[in-house]
Image: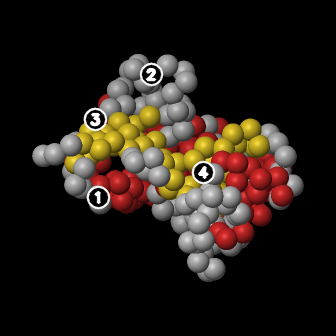
Amino acid sequence: GGQATEERLYIDEVDLAYREELWHAHRGGRPGDVEVFVRGLPPACSEEDLRQHLSALGVDDVKEVFFLRRADGASKGMAYIVNGSHESAELVRSQMHDAPAASVICVDGDGDGPDDRACLSAWFSESERLEQGQKSVYGRNLAGMLLGKGGQQIKELREEADVFRMALFGRPFPNPRNGEDEDHRIHLLVSYGEADDGAPARVLRLWGELLERLHLEQATRQRLDQRGGGESDDGGASDGEGPARSGA
């Protein structure tokens, strides 16, 4: 029993370590890709701190900085950075990936910042790629497959993760309850018991396993197609479009 806690979990929070190897040729993204995800930022880092850091790197066309926050409002040390051009996004990615976390100066830091060995990670936003559907470097509507027919994947994920409620939100999904200003990035809104501290990590692990499975299937399919030996069955391309609800 007890109170319920609600938290947004973003697709870029899952373990995407395999993506680099699986889609290495697409590491630099498409010419239109402008969003970069950064994790490992010092907890005290503010939007202003991060903008100052980007400016010092020579990036002067940052359009948006969006920090991910826990249910209690604390920073997760992760942020989406939307840039004015693909070139700027690539600069952010290349300069911030593997850089020391301590290189980001936080005005309000109280001395207990990241240890000297902590490094940042940065990559082209998975959310942005999934929002592009078949036009993305993956060549398939993986977002629709994350939802499943009639939201089946999310129903199963909620049951397996053993949480109260779970709904998938983002630009590709029908969402009758919210206006256009709702957060367009791909995320789960998860409601769980306030004593269940492990719920977010559990959900991210299971969601990540689902996404990795879809990636492996699609990468294999693309390789077969390139060799001319694959059937170009694109059955999953429209999953999740139409009237399917995105909640479970």
Classify 10 Å Cα crowding around label 4: few (below 14), some (14-19), many (20 and above).
many
**Does residue 138 appear in the picture of this structure?**
no
**Does residue 72 appear in the picture of this structure?**
yes
Q: Is residue 151 above or below residue 108?
A: above
Secondary structure beneath label 1: loop
Amino acid at pointer 1 = Asp
Between the residue at mark 1 and the residue at mark 4, the CA separation in whole angstroms equals 22 Å
Q: Nearer the viewer, residue 168 or 210?
A: 168
Residue drawn at x 24%, y 42% is 4
Q: Is residue 131 left or right of residue 35?
A: left
Secondary structure beneath label 3: loop
On the image, numbered disc 4 is attached to which residue? 79
Closer to the chain start, of discs 3 and 2, is 2
Closer to the chain start, of discs 1 and 3, is 1
Classify 10 Å Cα crowding around label 1: few (below 14), some (14-19), many (20 and above).
few
Q: x%, y% of residue 100?
A: 68, 73
Give me the disc on residue 197: 1
Q: Nearer the viewer, residue 246 or 194?
A: 194
Amino acid at pointer 4 = Ala
Between the residue at mark 2 and the residue at mark 1, the CA separation in whole angstroms equals 28 Å
Q: x%, y% of residue 73?
A: 45, 47
Closer to the chain start, of discs 4 and 3, is 4
Q: Nearer the viewer, residue 28 or 113?
A: 113
Give me the disc on residue 230: none
Between the residue at mark 2 and the residue at mark 4, the CA separation in whole angstroms equals 23 Å
On the image, numbered disc 3 is attached to which residue? 248
On the image, numbered disc 2 is attached to which residue? 178
